[in-house]
Amino acid sequence: KELLEEAKEELRREGRDFDPNMPIGMMVETPSAVWLATRLIREVDFFSIGTNDLIQYLLAVDRNNRKVAQLYEPLHPAVLSAIHETVQAAKGAGKWAGMCGEMAADPLCTIVLLGLGLDDVSMGPFFIPVIKRIVRSVSYSAARAIARDVTSMGTVKEVKGYLFDSMKSLGLIELLEMYH
């Protein structure tokens, strides 16, 4: 915050326009940030969960290493729990939580992320129509029920099976074919 105030003062001296009340956010990309989320949210206006790094650090898997990349799993129960805890910390403080990273653009993850309470997701423009269709096709209460169910599951296989079945029952299974 101190550096931000210095930058604002510099902009004032230069006579540049800026929003002095711009929101300040924080990337949550490490397990330690998840564990401290209820404390860290007091210092910022919002969280953005960076899933690429968070998943890698939570699961101790280098997604760029061919020998272990197959263990990189966004729907791992530990990952879902970390996202849930982070979102709950933000919501508990009356603030919002968003997400960036590959997981945000994965149609199989969309309903869970919606149900966990994410307010915003960032993705490449190619994925927007598919994700938008999914979001418009499911009620928030249904997404919350699905998220509640999968966060109590113990394996990736259980989570994926349940989500595939949910997508099928919602008539959205064809949207997975382009991604999975």
Image: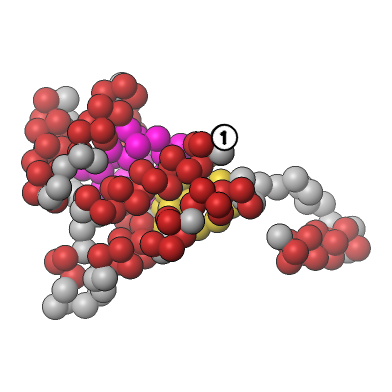
Relative placement, left or right, of 159 versus 30 is left
Q: Is residue 166 left or right of residue 147?
A: left
Asked if residue 98 is positioned above or below residue 67 in the image, the reply reads: above
Image: magenta residue range: 106-128
Is there any visible trace of residue 93 in the rendered image?
Answer: yes
Q: Nearer the viewer, residue 39 or 45?
A: 39
**Residue situated in front as seen by the camera: 45 or 135:** 45
Residue 20 at x, y = what percent? 79, 49
- Judge whether residue 31 is colored magenta: no
Measured as percent of width and height from the top left, residue 120 is found at: 45, 40
Q: Is residue 108 left or right of residue 127?
A: left
Residue drawn at x 88%, y 58% is: 12
Horizontal relation, residue 118 to residue 161: left or right = right
According to the image, label 1 marks what residue?
94
Q: Amino acid at mark 1?
A: Gly
Q: Is residue 124 magenta?
A: yes
Q: Split into 4 quadrants, where in the image is the N terminus?
A: bottom right
Report if residue 130 is visible in the image: no
Q: How many marks?
A: 1
Identify the residue shown where x is 85% and y is 61%.
9
- Residue 27, percent from left and from top: 50, 58
- Coloring scheme used: secondary structure
Question: Is 71 placed above or below 164 here?
Answer: below
Q: Quadrant of residue 84?
A: top left
Residue occupying the point 14% across, 47% down: 154
